[in-house]
Amino acid sequence: MTIDPDFLDELGRFGAALDRQAAALRQGDQESPRVGEGLTFSDYRRYAPGDDTRLIDWKLFARTEEYFIKEFEEERSLTVHLLVDASGSMDYGEAATPKFEYAAKLALGFGYLTAENNDEYRIHTFRDAADRLDADRSNRGELLAVIDQLNATDPAGETAFDEVLSAYAERIRSRSLVVVFSDFLADPERIEEGVAALARKDVDVLLVRVVAPAERDPPITGDTLFDDPESDATKRSYFSEGLAASYRRRLDGHVEAVSQRATGLGADHVLVETDADYFDAFASVWLA
């Protein structure tokens, strides 16, 4: 696999337009933005001479006939945790862009713009555990080193979403966004358990499901030998039009099941296909 770091330069130019779109989406919203700093209402206190009169809550004065000042606290800086699935199924896809490479580029883009917003990122690959790739500097130079590590990664094995995400939740100690990049080809209940563990830490969670077009519509017919990329299992089957239609229904059902379980826990779920233009796909993820 070879991720060319030049795409980060173009993403830097693209990022300004994304920030404008994000600002427009948040306009008038008093809640804290997902990425970036702001002010959060904390409490009231009685007005004292010398206080800024612009901070007086005049609606409260109308009810109480007393002057109260609104106090705000600066939001803590955000830590963005980027987890890229490195299991065997992520090696599938068109030769030019397997799912793992596409997911890794999305994660790198997230890290790049997070650093541009003066927030911190943590980049990991995961199978049965999350392995951190960055060295806690959250800058562009560090991303280049992470790219080398991603290029040297060979997706293999299986992923235990419930165990990995539950264990990772225990690491989180600050205001955070957790973004998981995966094909999520696992039992929806195990994925739900992992997302629930993160939700209990009161963090934002975004699931980015990466799908290869050939995975959605396999370009095969007739007698076919199927290999499980995450194990040594094989299965021979006659892949008829009827079986192909049944497969697509089951895949769509799985996507919907994961999405519903995630959103039911307050997480966001975005699906991207690896033949989509990278910057269009990145925009859909960043603005999710």
Image: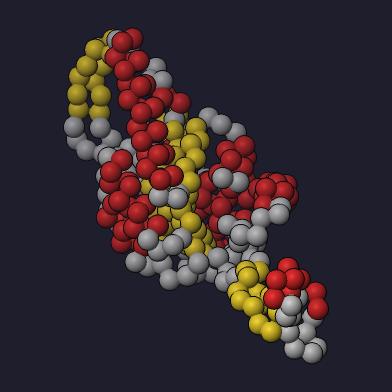
Residue in front for this viewpoint, 135 or 6: 135
**Residue 154 seen from this side:** no
Above or below 153: residue 170: below
In the picture, residue 189 is in which quadrant? top left
Q: Is residue 255 left or right of residue 156?
A: right
Above or below 189: residue 32: below
> Which residue corresponds to the image point at 69% horizontal and 76% vertical from the top-left?
64
State the image coordinates of residue 230 (x, y, percent, origin top left).
26, 39
State the image coordinates of residue 131 (x, y, percent, origin top left).
36, 59
> Which residue corresponds to the image point at 25% horizontal and 28% vertical from the top-left?
227
> Which residue corresponds to the image point at 33% horizontal and 47% vertical from the top-left?
192
Above or below 41: residue 15: above
Q: How is the image coloured?
A: secondary structure
Of the 4 image quadrants, the one containing the N terminus is top left
Of the 4 image quadrants, the one containing the C terminus is top right
> Which residue corresponds to the image point at 41% horizontal and 25% vertical from the top-left?
216
State the image coordinates of residue 44 (x, y, percent, origin top left).
64, 78
State the image coordinates of residue 161 (x, y, percent, origin top left).
31, 49
